[in-house]
Image (tube, rainbow, N blue to C red):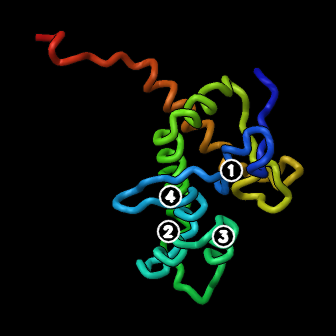
Amino acid sequence: MSDPIKFYSTGDEYGEFSNFAGYPIRIGKATWPTTEHYFQAMKFKSKADQDEIRKANSPMLAAKMGRDRKRTLRKDWESAKVNVMREALTAKFTQHEDLRKLLLGTGDAKIIEHTTNDDYWGDGGDGRGKNMLGRLLVELRDRLREECDTPTFDRDESQ
């Protein structure tokens, strides 16, 4: 097993894995500047709140807006947040071929968001956090690898 891959800041090695990395994603009819913008916006039911966050001029501002409790949080947010993140990551790593290759190139390494700022999405800095972002990236890597290994049949060949 390879050494674990730790990432956090966009300027670090594997900084592309950060939700703050500048890789726009298209989900539905909207384009989001980063996965952070999408994730933070999806916390809210109001389309106006979502759109305001989508237009934030930085992922840091989007994150700050997402923590604003003057906005009405979705009632199901706690149960929905992992799937929202999964959707954002899937869009990011399937819509940007270079990122897909980078993720697939991590082999079987454990991927860890290494930060003291977050013990749910990250490792909490001491490895005791849930590292949900890292886990979702590994899950996505496995799914992308399976898709690469699945033979596809051209309809014309089977006739």
| Residue 133 x, y percent position in the rendering | 66, 49
Image vertical order of residue 47 relative to residue 139, above or below: below
Residue drawn at x 87%, y 52% is: 125
Residue drawn at x 49%, y 32% is: 143
Q: CA distance from mark 1 to mark 4?
A: 15 Å
| Residue 60 x, y percent position in the rendering | 70, 68
Q: Are marks 4 and 2 in contact (CB under 8 Å)?
A: yes
From this viewpoint, which residue is outermost toward the right?
126
Query: Label 2 belongs to which residue?
Result: 42
Instruction: Tell which circle, 1 or 4, labels the residue nearer the N-terminal end.
Output: 1
Q: Are marks 2 and 3 in contact (CB under 8 Å)?
A: no
Where disc 4 sits, the SS reads helix
| Residue 152 x, y percent position in the rendering | 31, 19
Image vertical order of residue 95 relative to residue 87, above or below: above
Can the viewer see residue 149 in this picture? yes
Callout 1, which amino acid?
A: Ser
Q: CA distance from mark 3 to mark 4?
A: 15 Å
Instruction: Tell which circle, 2 or 3, labels the residue nearer the N-terminal end.
Output: 2
